[in-house]
Amino acid sequence: MNAARIVKVKEPLEIQSLQTPTPRGSQVLIRVESAGVCHSDIHLWDGGYEGPAGSFMKTTDRGVKYPLTPGHEVAGVVESMGEDVEGFVKNEKVLVFPWIGEGLCPACRVGEENLCDKPRSLGVYNDGGYAEYVLVPSYKYLAKINDMETDVCAPLSCSALTAYGAIKTAKLNPDDNVVVVGAGGLGLMGIQLAKAISGARIISLDVNDDKLKIAKQSGADVVINSTKEDPVKAIMELTGNLGADAVIDFVNATKSVETDMQILRRRARVVLVGLFGGSLQLNLVTMPTRAYKIMGSYTGSMTDMIELISLARRDIIKPVISNRFKLNQATEALTMLKEGKIIGRGIINP
């Protein structure tokens, strides 16, 4: 089989011919039809994340090994199965849950494998979906999607799942003013979900007018381009100088979070989601006196993903698929995403 692999960080992905895996036991071999292109893939390609005070957090220090086939948003069809697999048949369309844990830590035991102490995620710690086939370690990580389009379903396993987890963490109420920072694939899905689940008033913040236009179409009540107007002044005016009840930051860079902290109402919740990185200096006195809550949110559970499939099947949410690529265009796909040229989600169709 062919796979687009990161052999050396910051260098073009290489198309390599690998032996097609043979599933055994509870393993399932999936023929990949759609693999989403995610910002996390860029960090794997770059070899790390920006850390505090200009430091660099290497992916290899977190257990990532190269060469690596990235791609954790994977939808396709069952190609073959191990002898212990039940409930699936060949050529059945499925969505893969990639956030696989080791099964024994406290998080895994309560169904939160996405927060495992020793993660084994596909496309991060094990080869993923930038390939013609991907080996899934157990059929329990597969969800049936029946006649749904694989391009639309693939982002449900990360883009939508991460947004869904963040929305749940924020605990939004119908009368809340919520600021969604970033109107890329994650932010657009977050807007859709926040609108569908909570009915809160949504203020979308970004630096790109084209993305903000899609944000408006996705359900944002107000859009703000932070390069054209002062976002702090605009948001305070919109909220009667009280501030936002919640901020969900799908960028999570030093500059964006510094802005977040200036627009908070007392008792506000800040949910940090993006992986751009950096550091933040906090005024410690205001933390207790204004009773802020700052929380991180990382993807979601298998149960969350199944709920998203139901929402997508009923057209309550609609992932925005804006670009499609072939396997040999994987480097181009990552480059376009890194340069902010993909609005919505890019999909690789091997």
Image (spheres, grey):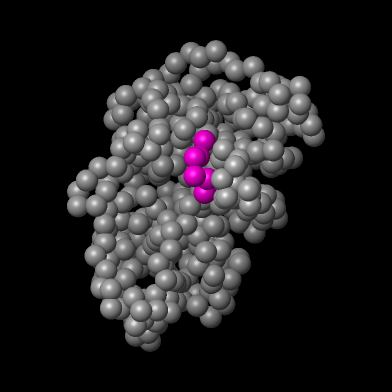
Image position of 78 (left or right of 189):
right
Residue 123 shown in magenta: no
Image position of 227 (left or right of 327):
left
Q: Is residue 4 above or below residue 88?
A: above
Residue stretch in magenta: 114-120
Q: Is residue 54 above or below residue 212?
A: above
Residue 86: percent from left, percent from top: 79, 31
Give whichever of 135, 65 is nearer the camera: 65
* Magenta-drawn stretch, dominant element (helix, strand or loop): loop
Residue at screen point 37% across, 84% down: 242
The picture quadrant where one finds residue 5 is top left
Q: Is residue 167 visible?
A: yes
Q: Is residue 248 above or below residue 17?
A: below
Give whichever of 168, 17 is nearer the camera: 168
Residue 133: percent from left, percent from top: 58, 23
Residue 75: percent from left, percent from top: 61, 36
Quadrant for the N terminus in the image: top right
Residue at screen point 62% across, 30% down: 137
Residue 262: percent from left, percent from top: 29, 74
